[in-house]
Image (cartoon, rainbow, N blue to C red):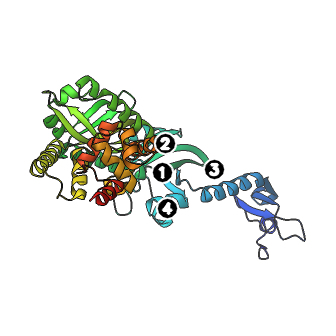
Amino acid sequence: HRLPPGQYPMERVLAGEAFDEVVVEVAPAGEEKSRWTHRIRTMVLTDAEGGPDCLALVLDDETERFDAEERFERAFAANPAPAVILRLSDLRYARVNRGFLEMTGYAEADVVGRSIQELDVLEGAKQREVAMERLREHRTVPQMEAWPRLPDSAPKLVLVAGQPIEVGDDACMLFTFADLEPRRRAEVAHRQSETLFEKAFRLAPVPMAVADLEDWFRFILVNEAFVDTMGHAEAEAVGRTAAELGLWDDPGAAGDLERRLREARTVRDVEVRLRGRRGGVMDCLLSAEAVAIDGRPCALWAMQDVTERRRTEAELATAIEAVMRDTSWFSRTVLEKLAKLRRPDAGGEASVEGVADLTTRGREVLGLVCRGLDDGAIAERLGLSRTTVRNHVNDLYRRTNARGRAALVVWARERGFAGVEPDGSRKKRRRSR
């Protein structure tokens, strides 16, 4: 901007005014935008009588320095990383950027002009004395954790480092910060989560174990219910595999289960038979989930002992069968449910569950098979070819998952089916009367 008359440096020096330093922006005549920045000072040389003899006007071109400072100011203000500049001559803060204000909640007026004693960004640092010594020596302050106070006096965990810089003619220290509070909160939440998991794991009423997923399922942790149910003390179980403890009644099924867990990362309610330390065999429903504990791939096992339930189901089936020896009047549907209850694994791939699901001809052939007739006798009885009868029998094998005539008879008897008179036989007897 233009100066009032009499305020230009040349006019002031001609008026005999001496001044130490004036900074002016200079532009060519006729242009508004300045191109240079000059620092001006005057010298007055006097004669023997002390009067002004010569007047000197000294100009220093400071354009580059001021441009660099302007670029630094813009970069400092725009930098999202929290930062403050501390003037070393009086240990007071000269500048603060938006990142620091947002991190701490201070206003700019609360920071600029305050001393490091009033707002200690190194508070709580283990190497604070080293940092203060480096500060006085205008040397780099290494990274360290500190706990500066917020406006509400609450401490905040930060990572702070200092770099000596020059701002104008002032020696300063540029402090930059990284907010470690989110990391600290995450670590606290993680520790609390681990504590809750451990308590829930220890107090769970069903046997549970944590095994190494990559080391043959070697046990890392077992809970109290595992110790009580399996009979193995924690010190005995930890560090050993289920195979080494002899838990698997069927090692082949165990290998298949472990393979499924590695591939699918989870298994649910798989029926297994486990052997306790005292030799007893238990029917269990086992569920497992692949988890990461401290970055280590593990498997979390949960086992439910259903031995008593299986025994009760078997005893119930036996009792009903003993009472219902004569199944002619008993509901076939109930008998079919009873057969399924007694042998839950039988016919797992069968396409029918009961006799009622078969065709009429299929029931006729099944009835004659139950009476002990071979294919030739059945063909003669029903007036069919042996090939047709053989096709019907093979269809019965497929639909019931039976693997022979004996198994087919057992399947029918379990469902209360003793055979029916073929339609042709009934018609012949009615005609003979």
Query: Which residue carries the number 2 mark?
Result: 135
Residue 91's disc number: 1
- The label nearer to you, 2 versus 3, is 2
Q: Are marks 3 and 4 in contact (CB under 8 Å)?
A: no
Q: Report the quarter where the N terminus lies.
A: bottom right
The answer to whether residue 218 is above or below residue 298 is above
Query: Which residue carries the number 3 mark?
Result: 169
First-in-chain label (2 vs 3): 2
- The label nearer to you, 1 versus 4, is 4
User: Could you tell me how far apart the alpha carbons at marks 1 and 4 are, in whole angstroms?
Assistant: 19 Å
- Label 3 is placed on what type of residue? Asp
Q: Nearer the viewer, residue 26 or 162?
A: 162
Q: Nearer the viewer, residue 399 or 24?
A: 399
- Where does residue 335 sit, x and y in percent of width and height? 22, 53
First-in-chain label (2 vs 4): 4
First-in-chain label (1 vs 3): 1
- Label 2 is placed on what type of residue? Leu
- Label 1 is placed on what type of residue? Leu
Binning the other alpha carbons within 10 Å of mark 4 as few (below 14), some (14 to 19) or many (20 upward) gives some
Binning the other alpha carbons within 10 Å of mark 1 as few (below 14), some (14 to 19) or many (20 upward) gives some
Local SS, label 4: helix
Q: Residue at x 36, y 55 (%)?
A: 424
- Where does residue 102 sit, x and y in percent of width and height? 49, 62
Query: Which residue carries the number 4 mark?
Result: 101
- Label 4 is placed on what type of residue? Leu
Q: Residue at x 50, y 56 (%)?
A: 93
